[in-house]
Image (cartoon, helix red, strand yellow):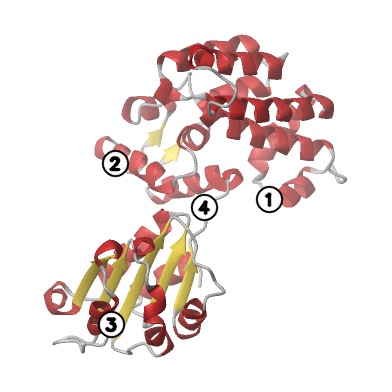
Amino acid sequence: MDFREIQKSIKEKNFSPLYILHGEEGYFIDVLVDAFEQNVLDESEKDFNQDIVYGKDAEAISLLSALNSYPLMASKRLVILKEAQNFTNLEALESYFDNPSPTTIFVIAYKYKKLDSRKKYVKSASKNGVVFTSDKVKEERLEEWIMSYMKNKGYTFASKVPSILASSLGNDLSRIVNELNKLDIVLESGTHVTEEHIENNIGISKEYNIFEMKNAVAKRDLAKALKIALYFDSNPKAGDINALIPILFSFFSQIMRIHFAKNKSTASIAAEMKIPPFILTNLMKEKNNYNPKKIAENIEVLYQYDLKGKGVGSTSENREFLMREMLLQIIL
């Protein structure tokens, strides 16, 4: 089952006895765990029938006791093991996974990494319950995800807003959602969100951000790129070389693929690269600013400065100049 299917089944109170929610993206896991807490039991049933245990404090014997207890004045019990990545003895629950109690809903929230699907207990859980893998949203789909989230919240938005958020906040969905929730405090549903709203309420400058830096590089606008780099020197939270390099690597990789695409039609390239057409339209124009040889050289430059940005072969005295040095080599 995918995320939406599990959400739907929870709201419809169509439960499996066992759920393992695991993966690198914590946001989807948190949303599903919250849905279980809100929908399985009524408030009057929770005192005697809901157990929430944290991985670092959990003991297998106590968990098994809770899992095999019968509900009291309710049809179900709910047991949630949160932060299960800190519980080192999931194998001890294997016998329970083979034969889960039909009156207990057991939810395991294992965040920030994946379980080994070859493990016997994972296979048993998959056979007798639901195993959901929470993957990171790929960078090329992140703007689309942000657009969908904002639309569901009732907002319309200026065209640059999703791009600014995606490039400045990265693909940590929990962070993106937390920042967007700041808008709920000051903006009514239906508001048209602008770059000014983002700057005033989230603190991302509409002119000096990672998205505008990427655009300056894409257009080979050295003056603008250096101006933004100077702003970053004074405002490190706005952007730094370690945040910029992955964005530029993705950009140059994408336009290299466009250069060598066999079928040059927009529809074909969008399907092959699995990116929305509105993103591809800009990339098709920007590829003309860099030929394949220059792109290859720039990818090598990014690799070198990725190491320097992490302190390899670079002294603390010149770290503030790294971004400008890199931009000069990439754009000229």
Identify the disc placed on residue 64. Answer: 3
Q: CA distance from mark 1 to mark 4?
A: 15 Å
Counting labels gives 4
Instruction: State the residue at coordinates (37%, 48%).
Output: 153
Identify the disc placed on residue 274. Answer: 1
Q: What amino acid is at disc 3? A: Leu
Question: Which residue is at the front of the view, 22 or 169?
Answer: 22
- Of discs 1 and 2, which sits in the foreground? 1
The answer to whether residue 23 is above or below residue 120 is above
Looking at the rendered structure, the secondary structure element under dot 4 is loop
Circle 3 residues within 10 Å: few <14, some 14–19, many ≥20: some
Q: Quadrant of the C terminus?
A: top right
Which comes sooner in the sequence, label 1 or label 3?
3
Circle 4 residues within 10 Å: few <14, some 14–19, many ≥20: some
Q: CA distance from mark 1 to mark 2?
A: 32 Å
Question: Which residue is at the front of the view, 223 or 329?
Answer: 329
236 with respect to 178 (left or right): right
Q: Are marks 1 and 4 in contact (CB under 8 Å)?
A: no
Which residue is the site of mark 4?
Answer: 136
Q: Are marks 1 and 3 in contact (CB under 8 Å)?
A: no
Q: Are marks 1 and 2 in contact (CB under 8 Å)?
A: no
Instruction: State the residue at coordinates (47%, 25%).
Output: 239
Q: CA distance from mark 3 to mark 2?
A: 41 Å
Could one spot residue 228 in this view of the protein? no
Q: CA distance from mark 1 to mark 3?
A: 44 Å
Q: What amino acid is at disc 4? A: Lys
Which residue is the site of mark 2?
Answer: 184
Considering every residue shown, the one lying at the far right of the view is 262
